[in-house]
Image (spheres, rainbow, N blue to C red):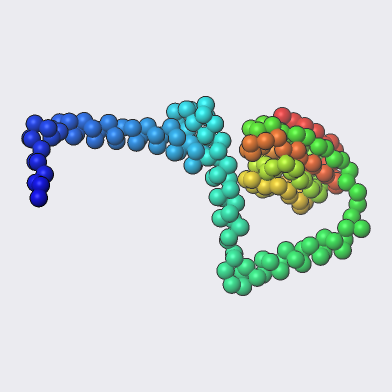
Amino acid sequence: MYNAQKPSPDDLPSSAQLLRSTAIALLAAVVILVTVVLPAEYGVDPTRIGQLLGLTEMGEIKSQLADEAEQDHHGDDGAAGDSSFLDRVFGAFVTSAHAQDAEPWRDEVSFTLAPGEGIEWKLAMAKGDTAAYEWAAEGGRVNFDLHGHGGGQRADYEKGRGRADGAGELTAPFAGDHGWFFRNRDRQDVTVILKVRGEYEEFKRTD
């Protein structure tokens, strides 16, 4: 039977060496956290290194998808979820039933956004004017901000992240420009088709 030879005390690392190794490992972990993990997972990039490596955009997309998934799960419990589902089904039937009676779209534009690119389209409206709209993104999803401004006033109607379409009506609470800012946060080109009709003086690109 062989006995293992005990290491000599001189062969063991000193306390100073252990502390130095621990400090180096901790510093390396912090550097990896700040330059890789935070940009890639959460879109947080304090050093801008993640942007150079293409990790920040990946983290932003992940955050958008997480926010969208969380929104999709709201109201999924019990009767609230059933009611939401029934509302969507009823809305689809109502939309289909009135499709033939709807007036034609007055204006329609199609534009393609490169990754990270933004664009703004507005309706010049008088106070009390009402306009209907519909838009759809092809090839990806976009962030949007539907708002209005004029005469020192501002109105926020709706915001969305990672959306592929939208529709509705807006009534101008004051005279000014009312409309959308779209930004492509996807990793490929996205084409957006925007249709409008109703009461407005002009449909224009303002960015």
On the picture, is 139 further left or further right than 104? left
Q: Is residue 152 visible?
A: no
Residue 24: x %, y % from top left: 27, 31
Q: Residue at x 67, y 70 (%)?
A: 83
Residue 196: x %, y % from top left: 83, 44
> 67 and 170: which one is in front?
67
> 108 and 54: which one is in front?
54
Quadrant in which the C terminus is drawn: top right
Q: Residue at x 74, y 30 (%)?
A: 206
Residue 114: x %, y % from top left: 69, 31
Residue 104: x %, y % from top left: 91, 49
On the picture, is 141 further left or further right than 39? right
On the picture, is 153 further left or further right than 131? left
Residue 6 picture quarter? top left
> 42 and 166: which one is in front?
42
Q: Where 16 falls versus 132 (above or below)?
A: above
Q: Where 130 falls versus 77 (above or below)?
A: above
